[in-house]
Image (tube, rainbow, N blue to C red):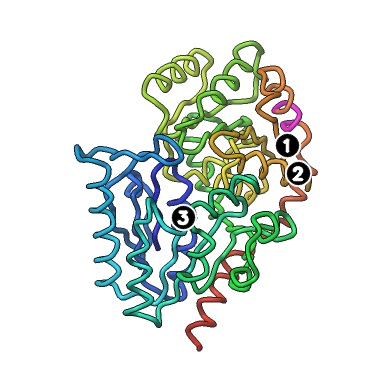
Amino acid sequence: MYSHDTFGLGHIRRTLAIARSLRKSPANILILTGSPLVGRFNIPRRVDFVRIPGMIKVTNEEYLPLSMKLEATEVLEIRKGIILSTAIAFQPDYFIVDKAPLGLKREVVDTLNWLKASRPQCTSILGLRDIMDSSASTIEDWESKGIYEAMESLYDEIWIYGHQDFYDSIKEYRIPDSVAAKVHFTGYIPRQIPSPGEVAGVKKELGIAPEERMVLLTTGGGGDGFPVLNTFLEAFERRKLPADTRVVVVTGPFLSNLHFKEVHRRCRAMGFVTLKFHRYMEALIGSAQVVVSMGGYNTVCEIISQCKPFLIIPRTVPREEQLIRAQVLCSKGYCDYLHPKELTPEAVWKKIMHLLENASELVERAEHFPFTALDVIRRRILDHKRV
């Protein structure tokens, strides 16, 4: 499994969720990742990872080495060599690429071509989240980079981790018929459900009493989360929190040190718990009565898996993916959301207070969310094995 991971935690979290499921097939799974935080996650038996040198995203098209004092082109060549040599050594039966059909700066193309030529029995699979970006932006990007051709020539299957009735990627992104024939909508990827004991343990660890309610704010990786963090804190700085309610803020490990210090100072003044990262986010979410997030694919799946009422405050730059997902899920009654243009402390306060007191309908709807991905993926792998 290849996960380029240049910014945030979404790719590695999705990859690990799939890996945990597939290892029971049974299978040995090796993850190629550039995530600097992969070692902080619980890696189960039969799953391991190869850490390739990290790159950090500067703009949509520009990437720089995360820590190595080398030119970006040199680090990319190192990454490309590690990916190919690992595939040659591991001799996979399946090669699953997460989200980026060509990899970072085309770094996975040599490996895909080698697999086609030297290990044709290997099934190459492209896994895409439910929504990539707006239709116009995605089509322009895929046309300019030759993505449609890559889907046609390099991949045997394309898995879309969403529901076609929610968002039809084939239609929205004008995927040609020859490629559409390879597409399988798997439904969404469910996440681990913590035990009551694990939830109680997290609350105790945070110093929150069992009877106290908890509001959780998470901004994913945190690299672009400060506007949401700032408005959220302003909402509570101006109003008194209900006596039985506590707040936990997870900034994400990629929030700048300067912003983290400011957030930590303001949280401490209000008695909020501040964390940069938590290795068991599922248990943290399980402890909350209401969750506020930016609407990334993985966070949304983690929240709905536990039927938690939640508010999405999406970003719209550099992509509109989170906004579109928020609109789709809100229209179907799974969450509430605030458009960035409507983002004010007053609006955030009203939405959170409403969710604290009126959660039953969202909870009931979440119980029927189409979390079919892992079953569909396992079935496709087992069907291939029988062939």
The segment highlighted magenta reads 352-356
Q: Nearer the viewer, mark 3 or mark 1?
A: 3
Horizontal and vertical percent position of residue 175: 63, 62
Q: Nearer the viewer, mark 2 or mark 1?
A: 1
Answer above or below: position of 203 versus 30: above
Horizontal and vertical percent position of residue 289: 65, 36
Three-letter amino acid code at the position of disc 1: Asp
Q: Nearer the viewer, residue 66 or 194?
A: 66
Q: Nearer the viewer, mark 3 or mark 2?
A: 3
Task: Assess whether residue 35 is covered by the magenta stretch.
Answer: no
Gap between marks 2 and 1, in whole Å? 9 Å
Gap between marks 3 and 1, in whole Å? 29 Å
- Asked whether disc 2 touches disc 1, contact meaning CB atoms under 8 Å apart, the reply is yes
Q: Nearer the viewer, residue 94 or 48?
A: 94
User: What residue does disc 3 label?
Assistant: 100
Three-letter amino acid code at the position of disc 2: Leu
The quadrant of the picture occupied by the N terminus is bottom left
Which mark is drawn over residue 336? 1
Answer above or below: position of 335 versus 269: below
Q: Residues within 10 Å of mark 2 (few under 14, many from 20)?
A: many
> Residue 259 occupies which quadrant of the picture?
top left
User: What residue does disc 2 label?
Assistant: 362
